[in-house]
């Protein structure tokens, strides 16, 4: 009997294949989005697996914040293997030929690192040869910024290196983030010549170790763990690196899948609505079949088979497209992923795509299809009475809705990093789709209730089309509204974030920061700035110290105490503190009182809220600091919040005046320059006189943040594109489905004497209202959405862009009218007879 | 007895109003006989036909078709019963628009699971004079041709009983005549019982018995010759 169902399904689709194809194409994009992301993601994970050693460049790395001392060295000696050392720190680089300076990360390298993989350089041999003389490898970003060439000089501290090659890729590090801190490699043997390593510089010392193949690194690390801890060394193994990367990459992957998933849902709604109309046109056929003896299930079966074949074909096409799109993803993610990916087809992803695509098509199709069971054979005898009288609830349809909801929830949960995010995503989905749906419903009711009956005929007819039987207002609303929502939300969020960064560089605000200024250099630099007429906007002293004890208990003791409620890293870190008599504008005291000057007894310090929590501190707690060998007794006088995003020196702990003045310290000086060339000039002057001082030009930071934000939004836009295309397909599908209805109407109207222009005007007005309603709802939702995003997720100021928003509104309305007209083409040219005889 | 009805009643409720369309209908139809149901428009003829064929369920009363109480059958069971023992002819032909003529004729047989259905359908189409129109779709056929296809479809499973609702209502006089002729020929050949709803007294006169409905009740039920015998 199933053979019959198949045969009927085939025959029944005979005249509608083109339409069915259009319907199924609404899920293609969604499946393609999923498959491309998943398949690429799996290739990526595979790459991480294969290249795990390359990610670290060694089998084991051991890091320290202080130079390796004798104890450290003897441990390293015991560990054995091939070893390589790296000393890294931030410093200014000066390009004499181009007369430019920029804060960079200097890495002085000794030995054969990387043992696995290569530093990719142009020319390639530079990766090895720079170690043999006064040469440097310079990050490509930096070379491009200053248009420097291989062979040019670059000055670090008091030594000038020759650029041996440009660095295009470092295994395990992503290119995009090199923009924040471009890297320069120099040979270790020339480190001293720079004179950059001084007391108080933040330096990181790393030993890279390579073992014989087959050596059990994990086991070794487990063995030496206690000693590493005791010596305050941290270690990293290939295994840890791999796990870390895999975690992060699957987060990225899952996030992109969720964005792609929206396209699938929209496509599913498109399928549901097309099938709804399709089935409506089949009511009579189904009634006849029931009359001549087809059972309810057989008649349902015919359309279920059609929907499954549609779903399967759509999923197959989507999968194929997804595998093609997969080739594009490396370009989309360019610079964001830290390793080379060999794009291969992931059969897991293909299976997932087919399953999810077919599942979505069937679940969404089930809702309009299940009522087919209940079509009465009586309709073959007489159709008009069917709609009267209430029908009881169809529990299967209810179940289908619940299954659909459950499937969406499960998918969200599976692909979200935490279940909270999953539920949030699901909730946001419901909210957006629900609001669009509700607005469509509301608009239909309102228009009907307050119908402007005094308007011109064409306007009334166009408006009435929004709620007449067979209308598709709701699907069109969803398709157009969701697309608009996506575009505008992405845009507004990105702009708000950018605006905040740009504000920093605006009129009157400080934009150039000098730090690591030693006490004996301070006056010289201040004089230099003043000689150029530059203001000293801030002059902040910084004293480094460690915590010795809290509440009378030594830090060492606390670290061992399992009862201790704070974080251990917070106990052992170095604190850079300042002292001053008042709070900054960016700070707010939330407990205790800020005291600006110290007289006697314990020093009242102000602790930032977050670190107070990490250290488990409350007002009045005793603290003992080790200020470079000198003990200082303090107590928590106040707890305050800090607006960290403001680009200025912020501190965990602020001391009052009257205690640290004589301690060894350095300073941060903040000024403002009015042009990029002034900024470059003063930086160069300061750096030449004081090579250890670093400068950050905030306009540089703004550019960097912009460029990274651009990359990220590009990725999200790329994924959102799938939803937007789906929206267009659904829109087209809906308009095509309504085509026959329109044709009949327009023939009728023409027979009754309407002119073509009038009919065209009616169409125009209808699409105008639809587009305007959908786009404005989408925009309204996106205003709420991007406001909430910037406000609560990014904790930043929301910026409205009225002109662009209005532009999107007009654009979407024009597009809706355009697509509407493109698909209504030919309707007006149909001779009436053709319509009366037509099938669909 | 092929069809037995007992105190049938049908009430429709639209909104909160109740509309009684049929009441106290009882009659029997003998195997192989032919019956017309006549009556003014709105008297409940189509409703009654729908009940007898198991397309709808009565509000009161009982229907037994070919020995089976329709009230005890599920939708599935009713469908099977219709497929095996019941044929239909409708006023508006009701061919399936997406199927060709021959496919329309084949469907009941296919549903039945019959094997040689293709040749049988072809035979029937030949018999109704459409041997050269197998692959035409309904829209490519005239009304009379469509009704002939419908006749072939109605008889393909050799039903015990055939229900026809105004089979010639949409046809001109000449075509009607041909279709009527075919209907009665096929009926005789296959020994089918015929239940026919019509306004057309000439057509009714060709059946053995006439049941008259008025406002949902049987007002007369007698053999044809006696009805026609009495002066109208
Ligand atoms: N589903 C329904 N809901 C409400 N009323 C109905 C329904 N079906 C039929 N009726 C009413 O029942 C009455 C009988 O209808 P029916 O179609 O059986 O009449 P008929 O005798 O076949 O008429 P005609 O000769 O015009 O075909 C009519 O008044 C009709 O309005
Ligand atoms: Mg009738």
Image (tube, rainbow, N blue to C red):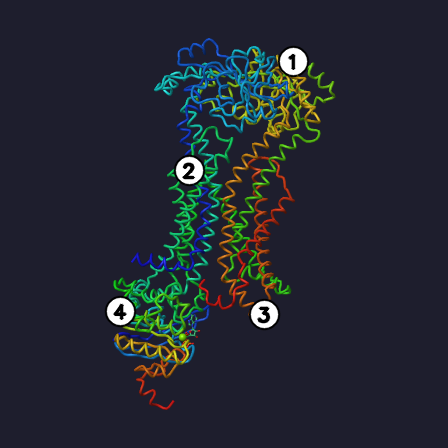
Residue B175, percent from left and from top: 38, 78
Density class for disc 3 (Cα within 10 Å; few <14, some 14-19, many ≥20) is few
Q: Which residue is mark 3?
A: A753
Density class for disc 2 (Cα within 10 Å; few <14, some 14-19, many ≥20) is many
**Which residue is nearer to you in this view: A716 or B12?**
A716
Residue found at the far bottom of this picture? B231
Q: Which residue is mark 1?
A: A519
Q: Is residue A380 above or below residue A659?
A: below
Q: Where, by quadrant of the figure, is residue B225 drawn?
A: bottom left
Image disc number at residue B68: 4
Chain bearing tag 1 is A
Pointers 3 and 2 in contact (CB under 8 A)? no
Q: Element type at marker 2?
A: helix
Residue A294 in view, yes or no = yes
Residue A77, percent from left and from top: 41, 10
Q: Quadrant of ligand 1?
A: bottom left
Residue found at the far front of this picture? B132
Q: Earlier in the sequence, mark 1 or mark 2?
A: 2
What is the C-alpha distance between the residues marked 4 and 3?
Answer: 57 Å
Pointers 1 and 4 in contact (CB under 8 A)? no
Chain bearing tag 3 is A
What is the C-alpha distance between the residues marked 1 and 2?
Answer: 57 Å
Density class for disc 4 (Cα within 10 Å; few <14, some 14-19, many ≥20) is some
Residue visible at 56% across and 23% down in the picture:
A182
Residue A70, percent from left and from top: 46, 8
Q: Which residue is mark 2?
A: A39
* Number of marks drawn: 4
Do the residues indicated by labels 1 and 2 lie within the same chain of the protein?
Answer: yes
**Mark nearer the viewer, 4 or 2:** 2
Q: Element type at marker 4?
A: strand
């Amino acid at each position: 009997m199933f053979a019959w169902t198949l045969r009927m399904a085939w025959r029944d689709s005979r005249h509608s294949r083109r339409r069915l194809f259009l319907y199924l194409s609404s899920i293609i994009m969604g499946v393609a989005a999923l498959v491309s992301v998943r398949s690429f993601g799996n290739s990526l994970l595979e790459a991480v697996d294969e290249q795990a050693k390359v990610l670290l460049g060694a089998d084991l790395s051991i890091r320290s914040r202080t130079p390796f001392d004798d104890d450290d060295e003897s441990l390293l000696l015991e560990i054995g293997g091939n070893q390589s050392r790296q000393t890294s720190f931030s410093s200014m680089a000066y390009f004499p030929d181009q007369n430019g300076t920029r804060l960079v990360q200097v890495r002085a390298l000794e030995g054969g690192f990387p043992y696995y993989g290569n530093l990719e350089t142009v020319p390639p041999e530079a990766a090895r040869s720079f170690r043999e003389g006064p040469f440097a490898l310079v990050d490509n970003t930096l070379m491009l910024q200053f248009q420097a060439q291989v062979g040019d000089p670059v000055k670090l501290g008091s030594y000038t290196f020759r650029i041996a090659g440009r660095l295009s890729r470092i295994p395990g590090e992503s290119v995009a983030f090199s923009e924040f801190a471009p890297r320069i490699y120099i040979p270790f043997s020339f480190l001293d010549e720079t004179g950059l390593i001084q007391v108080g510089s933040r330096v990181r010392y790393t030993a890279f170790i390579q073992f014989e193949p087959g050596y059990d690194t994990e086991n070794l690390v487990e063995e030496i763990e206690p000693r590493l801890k005791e010596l305050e060394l941290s270690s990293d193994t290939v295994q840890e690196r791999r796990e870390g990367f895999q975690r992060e990459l699957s987060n990225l992957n899952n996030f992109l899948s969720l964005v792609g998933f929206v396209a699938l849902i929209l496509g599913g709604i498109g399928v549901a609505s097309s099938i709804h109309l399709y089935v409506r046109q089949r009511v009579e056929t189904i009634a006849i079949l029931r009359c001549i003896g087809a059972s309810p299930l057989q008649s349902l079966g015919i359309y279920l088979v059609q929907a499954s074949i549609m779903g399967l074909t759509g999923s197959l096409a989507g999968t194929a497209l997804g595998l093609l799109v997969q080739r594009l993803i490396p370009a989309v993610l360019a610079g964001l992923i830290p390793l080379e990916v060999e794009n291969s087809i992931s059969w897991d992803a293909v299976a997932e795509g087919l399953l999810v695509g077919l599942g979505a098509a069937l679940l969404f199709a089930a809702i309009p299809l299940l009522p087919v069971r209940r079509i009465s054979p009586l309709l073959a005898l007489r159709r008009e009475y069917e709609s009267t009288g209430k029908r009881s609830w169809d529990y299967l349809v209810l179940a289908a809705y619940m299954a659909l909801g459950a499937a969406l929830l499960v998918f969200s949960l599976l692909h979200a990093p935490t279940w909270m995010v999953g539920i949030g995503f699901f909730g946001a989905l419901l909210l957006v789709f629900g609001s669009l749906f509700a607005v469509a419903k509301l608009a239909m009711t309102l228009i009907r209730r307050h119908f402007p009956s005094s308007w011109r005929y064409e306007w009334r007819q166009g408006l009435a089309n929004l709620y007449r039987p067979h209308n598709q207002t709701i699907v069109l609303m969803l398709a157009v509204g969701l697309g608009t929502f996506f575009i505008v939300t992405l845009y507004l969020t990105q702009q708000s974030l950018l605006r905040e960064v740009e504000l920093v560089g605006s009129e009157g605000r400080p934009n150039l920061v000098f730090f690591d200024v030693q006490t004996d250099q301070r006056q010289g630099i201040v004089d230099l700035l003043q000689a150029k007429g530059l203001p000293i906007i801030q002059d902040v002293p910084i004293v480094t110290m460690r915590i010795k004890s809290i509440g009378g208990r030594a830090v060492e003791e606390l670290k061992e105490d399992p009862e201790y409620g704070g974080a251990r890293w917070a106990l052992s870190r170095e604190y850079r503190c300042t002292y001053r008599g008042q709070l900054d504008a960016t700070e707010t005291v939330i407990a205790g009182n800020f005291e600006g000057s110290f007289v006697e007894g314990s020093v009242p310090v102000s602790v930032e809220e977050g670190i107070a929590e990490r250290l488990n501190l409350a007002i009045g707690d005793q603290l003992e600091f080790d200020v470079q060998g000198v003990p200082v007794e303090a107590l928590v006088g106040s707890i305050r919040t800090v607006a960290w995003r403001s680009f200025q020196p912020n501190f965990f702990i602020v001391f009052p005046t009257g205690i640290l003045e004589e301690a060894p310290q350095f300073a941060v000086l903040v000024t403002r320059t009015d042009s990029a060339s002034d900024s470059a000039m003063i930086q160069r002057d300061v750096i030449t006189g004081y090579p250890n001082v670093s400068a950050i030009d905030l306009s540089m930071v703004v550019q960097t943040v912009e460029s990274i934000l651009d990359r990220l939004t590009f990725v999200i836009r790329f994924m959102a594109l799938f939803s937007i295309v789906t929206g267009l397909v659904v829109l087209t599908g809906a308009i095509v489905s309504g085509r026959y209805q329109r044709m009949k109407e327009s023939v009728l109207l023409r027979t009754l004497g309407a002119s073509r222009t009038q009919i065209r005007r009616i169409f125009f007005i209808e699409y105008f209202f639809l587009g305007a309603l959908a786009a404005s709802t989408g925009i309204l939702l996106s205003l709420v959405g991007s406001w909430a995003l910037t406000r609560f997720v990014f904790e930043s100021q929301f910026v409205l862009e009225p002109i662009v928003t209005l532009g999107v509104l007009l654009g979407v309305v024009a597009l809706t009218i355009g697509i509407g007209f493109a698909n209504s083409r030919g309707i007006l040219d149909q001779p009436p007879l053709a319509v009366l005889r037509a099938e669909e | 007895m092929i069809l037995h009805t007992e105190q049938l009643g049908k009430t429709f409720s639209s909104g909160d109003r109740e509309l009684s369309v049929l009441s106290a209908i009882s009659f029997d139809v003998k195997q192989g006989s032919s019956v017309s149901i006549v009556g003014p428009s709105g008297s409940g003829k189509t409703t009654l036909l729908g009940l007898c064929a198991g397309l709808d369920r009565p509000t009161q009363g009982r229907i037994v078709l070919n020995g089976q109480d329709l009230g005890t059958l599920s939708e599935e069971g009713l469908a099977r019963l219709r497929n095996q023992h019941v044929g239909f002819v409708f006023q508006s032909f009701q061919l399936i628009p997406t199927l060709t003529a021959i496919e329309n004729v084949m469907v009941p047989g296919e549903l039945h699971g019959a094997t040689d259905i293709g040749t049988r359908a072809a035979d029937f189409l030949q018999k109704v004079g459409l041997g050269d129109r197998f692959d035409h779709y309904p829209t490519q056929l005239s009304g009379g041709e469509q009704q002939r296809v419908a006749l072939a479809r109605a008889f393909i499973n050799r039903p015990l009983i055939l229900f026809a609702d105004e089979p010639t209502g949409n046809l001109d006089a000449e075509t009607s005549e041909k279709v009527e002729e075919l209907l009665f020929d096929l009926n005789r050949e296959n020994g089918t019982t015929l239940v026919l709803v019509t306004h057309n007294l000439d057509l009714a006169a060709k059946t053995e018995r006439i049941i008259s409905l008025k406002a949902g009740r049987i007002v007369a039920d007698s053999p044809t010759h006696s009805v026609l015998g009495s002066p109208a």
